[in-house]
Amino acid sequence: MQFIDLEKQQKRIRDKIDQNIKKVLDHGKYINGPEMAELENRLADYCGTKYAIGCSNGTEALLMALMAYDIGPGDAIFSTAFTFIATSEVARILKATPVFVDIDKTTYNIDSNGLEDAIKKVIKDGKLKPRCVIPVDLFGQCADMDEINKIADKYELMVIEDAAQSFGAEYKGRKACSLAHVATTSFFPAKPLGCYGDGGMIFTNDKSMYETIVSIRIHGKGTDKYDNIRIGLNGRLDTIQAAILLAKFDIFEEEIALRQAVADYYSRGLSDCVTIPVIRDYNRSVWAQYCVRHPERDRIMGEMKKDGIPIMIYYPKPLHLQGAFGDLGYSIGDFPVSEAVSNDIFALPMYPYLGKEEQDMVISSLRKAIGK
Ligand SMILES: *Cc1c(COP(=O)(O)O)cnc(C)c1O
C-alpha cells in the first residue's frame, strides 16, 4: 500500500497526458506556451477569480505575492504556527518577521481570536509594522476566511490565502483561492491537483496586483523582458506542466467526490477510537490529508508500520519551535494547541483511488493497535 498512489490516476488518463505532452513537443513553446494561458483561464473560471498566474511552485507563489506587497524588514506577517515551513519561510526570505498564532482546537486552522490578540500585541510593542496575514487552508479545509478578512480590514492588513492544500475546496459556497485579496496554491505532485514536477498558481481579482505579479514572475519586466522596472525573479510554470495539469483537471471534480467517499469511510470506521477530522458544515474539504489524533500515536504508528501501513505526521514540529525560526525568540508553551496537536496527530493513506479493501486494512490495523 502507498500513502499516496499517483500511478492509478496516471493509468486512467495516460493517453490524454501523452497527447497533451506531444502537443507541447510539437509546437516547442516550452516557456509561456498556449497551455499555460489555457490553464490560467480554466482555473480562474473554476475558482471564480478574474486572474490566475501560473508559477514555478507554491512557495514562489507566496514569495511573489509578498514581493508585490513590497514586504521587507520591519514588517510583521501573521500566520499559523501549525503548517508547512513554506508559509512563513517566505516572510523571512524578505527579512520580514513572521508572527505566529495558535490554531483552532477542532479544525487546526489559524485561531481568529488569537490572530487579533497577536496584531494588538505587535501594535502595542511598536517595533514592527503589521502588514499581512497568511491563513492556511490546512489539510484541504478552508480557514475561517470571513472572520480573518474582517480582522484584517479592521487593522488594514493584506490577506494572502495559502491554498496549497485546498485547491477545489469550498467555503460558504465560494471556492478556495477566491477567499482573500490574493491566494496561492501548489501543484506539487502529492497535492490534490498535482503536476509531474513543481508548479503553483496565484489568484486575484485585483488588476494592478495581477500586473505587478506578472512582472515579478519574469524578472520585474516592464514592456518586455529586457526592460526591467523592479526586482523580480524567474517564477514561471513550465508549459509541459500546464499541459499535464489540463489533463488532470478534466477529472478533478470527480476525484474530489472520490476523496470525500474515502474520508467518509474512514470516519465511519474510526470515530469510536481516534479523534477524527471535523469539517465545518459550511466547508467542503478536498482532503489533502486525512489526519487523526490519539495520545499513543507513536506506539500505534509503530504497530501499523509492522502491518505495512504507511503513516505520515503532519506536522511533527510547529513552526515556532523550528531551528530555522530560532532567532524569533519563541519557546515551548507559546502555542499550546499547536504543540499538543503536533504530539498526537498522524495521517492515514489518502488518495481518490484508495480501495475499500485497502481502507479496511488501515482501519483494522489501527483498531487492533488500540485494542478495539
Ligand atoms: C506544499 C505547501 C506549500 C509549498 O508548495 P510547494 O509547491 O511545495 O512550494 C506552501 N504551503 C503549504 C501549506 C503547503 O502545504
Image (spheres, rainbow, N blue to C red):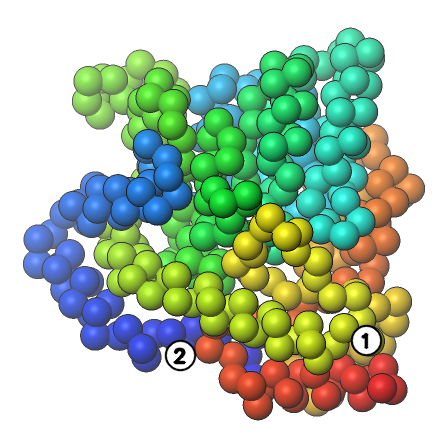
Q: Taking 30 as reference, is 146 left or right?
A: right
Q: Residues within 10 Å of mark 1 (few under 14, many from 20)?
A: few
Give the foreground label among 1 and 2: 1
Q: CA distance from mark 1 to mark 2?
A: 31 Å
The residue that label 2 is drawn on is 8
Q: Is residue 196 above or below residue 332?
A: below
Image quadrant where one finds the C terminus? bottom right
Q: Earlier in the sequence, mark 1 or mark 2?
A: 2
Q: Residue furthest left?
A: 26
Instruction: Tell me which corner region of the image, top left, top right, bottom left or bottom right, holds residue 25.
Output: bottom left
User: Which residue occupies the foreground of this view, 309 or 173?
Assistant: 173
* Three-letter code, disc 1: Asp
Report the residue at 82% width, 11% height from top: 124
At horizontal 63% and vertical 42% (from top left) the residue drawn is 143
Instruction: Judge whether residue 60 can be spotted in this image.
Output: no
Mark 1: secondary structure: loop
Residue 18 located left or right of residue 162: left
Which residue is at a point 55% across and 43% down the rendered structure image? 172
Q: Amino acid at mark 2?
A: Lys
Pointer 1 residue: 272
The quadrant holding residue 194 is bottom left
Q: Is residue 96 left or right of residue 304?
A: left
- Residue 100 image position (x, y, % from top left): 74, 34
Asked which secondary structure carries label 2, the reply is helix
Q: Is residue 22 above or below residue 159?
A: below
Cβ of mark 1 under 8 Å from ligand 1: the answer is no
Q: Assign the N terminus to one quadrant of the image.
A: bottom right
At 38% across and 27% down in the image, what residue appears?
205
* Image quarter of residue 110: top right
